[in-house]
Image (cartoon, helix red, strand yellow):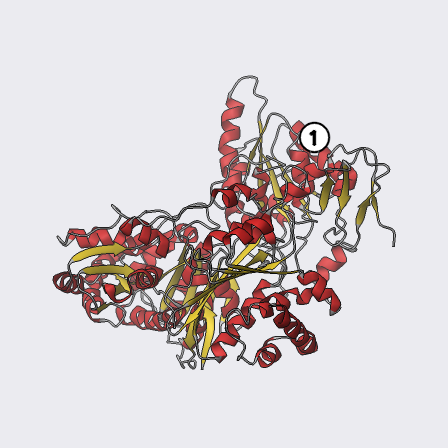
Amino acid sequence: MKQLITGDEAVARGAWEAGVRFAAAYPGTPSTEILENIATYKEIHSEWAPNEKTALESVIGASLAGARAIASMKHVGLNVAADPFFTFAYMGVNAGAVVVTADEPGQFSSQNEQDNRNYAKAAMTPMFEPSDSQECKDMLLEAFEISEQYDIPVLFRMTTRVCHSKSLVELGDRQDVPIKPYVKNIKKYVAVPANARPMKVKVQQNQELLKGYSNNCQWNRIEMHEPGIGIICSGDCYLYAREVFGDGASYLKLGFTNPLPDDLIREFASKVGKIYILEENDPYIEDHVRALGIACDGKNLFPRNGEMKPEVIRAAMFGEEYPVDNDVRSAIIPRPPTLCAGCPHRGFFYELGRRKNVMVSGDIGCYTLASGAPYHAMESTVCMGASISLGHGAQQIFDSIEGNQMRVVSVLGDSTFFHTGINSLMDVAYNKSNLITVVLDNRITAMTGQQDNPGSGRTVQGEITEAVSIEAIARAFGFKNVRVIDPNQLTQVKETLDWALGLQEPSVIITRWPCALKKQTALDKEEFKGSFSSVYWVNEELCIGCKKCTRTGCPAIVFQLEKKKSSIEAEKCVGCSVCAQVCPVHAIQKVEA
Amino acid sequence: MTTKNILLTGVGGQGTILASKLLTEGLLSKGYDVKMSEVHGMSQREGPVLTHVRFGEKVFSPIVEAKKADVIIGFEELEVLRNLEYLRTDGKGIVILNEMRVNPIGVQNGSDKYPENVAELISAHAGKVIAIDASEEARKLGNLRVMNIILLAASVRQLGLEEIDWNKIIAENVKPQFVALNQQAFELGKSLG
């Protein structure tokens, strides 16, 4: 039966069909839906890991214990998991293991545009690059075979368009892959230098053996049409190339891209005229083709950033232009993302943004929006967990300056805290910086679409579990100054910031209120009784048009330019009351039932 | 046949996802090759949504090229304007335009003005505009949420897809209690297109 499914869904289906028994991931666009879909198959034990490193390490364990296993992550997640990834390649597997990396050409929701194909080359792991959903499923099945045959984990490289585009997939049945016996093998699984040296030799030999596979496998193929132009491409670039050139060019379509198929590349080069390399991000294929002594055009023509969309190819190759109508362009106003009505981050940033002599070190989550209007209350964002450690370093320097007034407030969410912020907080305790750490605990991983995490009390497969306490962690680390507050109560936020800024030692503030979009658990409903159940309105007779309420950045508030009065859209308001607390004349009032 | 290109655009929460699901299921039932692409960014309310749908005998790219969209199904005026550069410029591009404005935050707080002349700008660039007040039409049926079905249905004749058994597609993809309502909305939408 054929179904129209996304690449992420196809990978999940492929994992199920491949007999996978263990899957772990940390949510990250565009990879999140892989584990969400795997978790719907009851035969696969699925877990949201605290971060990508723990996800991959538990996958290594599952493989060693004899079960096929898969870890999925966004491109920057593999940076976090890079440590186990490299050495896992040395050790090899017991049952097959695949690591999925979802890269983001175009940076739709990522902090960088790194090309993770370089990881396969650096770690000497085999790599697949599917271009549509059918290939996602087929190649994943093959990846497990290759992993077991060559005794090595496989890198499975997707991109946003491959992850989030739907195309037809022929579904298959689940293979019966029994759990292999675990055999104690210290030489294979203990990567101490004496063992790791021969391991590396084995990996190098593997790369040589895999060249034969790469030259002859079905995933790398020559499609001859018009021989004048030869296109070498992988991933979604193949689809874009077919769209632009049709049968007017010949193609070397690459789906298995580490090691690259030297013989096939030479054969293709001998059959076609001018060669163009179409690939997103780095000149990964191009550098290799040039090293073979084959002349080609690549990044000298095509951009190294963004997606290689058909119009990008046409513009680069044929000088085709896409003039934009100025009357249309100039009329368009932006629709920037905003914190939702009722977002528990609003009240906190409204207060924090008013502080002087404060550097706000931020992190990755919905709250990164606080760097924009109207809050401007975040001034650095690097990677997951960096808010605390970056803030720690900055505070150490500020404090070394005589007469220093600057305090650093590090801000991150609950899921980001569990991801890597927890290590950084240990650094603050151990190395004694005067840092104010704020964990915005909205009881869920919100930005990627409501995934559970170690603090939410629920697993990816919906089971109730231990909810890890951030407060208890902070106290266990030795912090004496820990407060848990309700971020919607501005007086409480204000007083707590005053308290923390007044201390000459580190403090931890936990703002605890659920995301407005969270499907609350029974425990949430008990703890946050009556949340999101009221509505506020503006009494226009009292409103003086001062626009203070609009500075909360709430999308439910409308400032009526003609009347110079505020109003509230009742269907959006969920009653957080932050605007009412900001209003100097009490014009914003609760609608009485 | 040449591949047909459709864009659905609006803001989160308007039901574009169900509309594109029904559209692609309908196309599959006729044996077309179909590809669809949607970029998910931050999970928040009322963010811009853009869905690409392409169908034909054999479709390669999942995304519509600039100046090649045959039909834009626009759920929100400003979002149609934002994506107007996708519309073909040979006078054959069609826009199904929902007469609805969802203010971005800048308009809400008084720092931006919603462009006044959106409909005129769209008309000037499209071969044909079918303007529908879908929320008003949906209200007639007693449920605002079927706005998406009305807009989708309005594109059916323009795309030459009248022969698809849409009632069956709806029955197979919508919760049982909403099937009859959505089928009604589809009939209404078809008559408007």
Spot the residue most to the top. A402
Percent position of residue A555, x then y: 68, 46
Amino acid tagged 1? Asp
Give left or right: position of A206 versus A41.
left
Camera-nearest residue between A538 and A173 = A538
Image quarter in which the N terminus of chain A is found: bottom left
Percent position of residue A295, x then y: 15, 52
- Look at the picture and state if A53 lies above or below A178: above
Camera-nearest residue between A465 and A260 = A260
Percent position of residue A284, x then y: 27, 52
Camera-nearest residue between A497 and A295 = A295
**Element assignment for label 1:** helix
Image quarter in which the C terminus of chain A is found: bottom right
Dot 1, crowdedness within 10 Å: few (<14), some or many (≥20)? few
Q: Residue visible at 64% across and 33% down?
A: A353
Based on the displayed image, in which of its 4 quarters is residue A196 positioned?
bottom left
Q: Which residue is tagged 1?
A: A498
